[in-house]
Image (cartoon, rainbow, N blue to C red):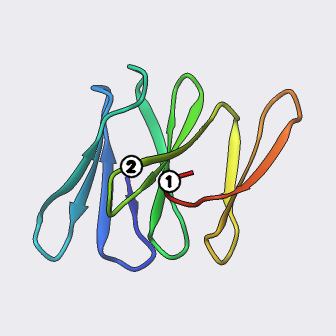
Amino acid sequence: MAFSPDGRYLTTGSADPTVRIWDLARQKYYRVLDQFDNWEVTDFSFSPGSRFIAAFNSDPAIYVYDIDSGALVAQQRPSYCSWSPDGRYLATSGFETTLWAAPVTPGQ
């Protein structure tokens, strides 16, 4: 479970494998994300501006979604990740010591 930095959303996950984004002001689902290759979602991380969410599954893989459109904007198979303070980059690394840092832009 994770709250967005702006306090607008709460995410929940389950073994079904989906992520539900809740609109806290309206107290209902805002969006359901379900493109996780049938693996259980294990963790979430919002970008600092609450525009994107990175969801981690037990494969392990990271899926980055644009919250407003629900579009999948990036996918990687690392073990760890961290957002840049401005929310423009997501850095990831894996057990094989690769490092990936890329801008997160819808439509790319």
**Which residue is painted at 70% across and 35% down in the image?**
78
Compared to 26, does 52 lie above or below? above
- The residue sitting at the right extreme is 97
Classify residue 33 as left or right of residue 46.
left
Task: Kindly indicate whether the residue at mark 2 contacts the one at mark 1 (C-beta within 8 angstroms).
Answer: yes
- Crowd tier of the residue under label 2, counting other residues whose Cα lies within 10 Å: few below 14, some 14–19, many 20 or above: some
According to the picture, the residue beneath numbered tag 1 turns out to be: 107
Classify residue 31 as left or right of residue 83.
left
**Disc 1 on helix, strand or loop?**
loop
Q: Identity of the amino acid at label 2?
A: Ala
Q: Nearer the viewer, mark 1 or mark 2?
A: 1
Nearest the camera: 102 or 31? 102
**Number of numbered markers:** 2
**Which residue is painted at 66% across and 30% down in the image?**
77
**Which residue is painted at 57% across and 61% down in the image?**
105
According to the picture, the residue beneath numbered tag 2 turns out to be: 71
Q: Position of residue 6 (x, y in %)?
A: 40, 80
- Crowd tier of the residue under label 1, counting other residues whose Cα lies within 10 Å: few below 14, some 14–19, many 20 or above: few
Compared to 26, does 11 lie above or below? above
**Disc 2 on helix, strand or loop?**
loop
**Which residue is painted at 40% across and 26% down in the image?**
40
Classify residue 9 as left or right of residue 105.
left
Compared to 98, does 20 lie above or below? below
For marks 1 and 2 on the same chain, the one whose residue lies earlier in the sequence: 2
Q: Position of residue 2 (x, y in %)?
A: 40, 59
Nearest the camera: 57 or 72? 72
Q: Quadrant of residue 59?
A: top right
Nearest the camera: 5 or 102? 102
Q: Identity of the amino acid at label 1?
A: Gly
Task: Tell me the distance, in whole angstroms, between the alpha carbons under discs 1 and 2.
Answer: 8 Å
Marker disc for residue 33? none
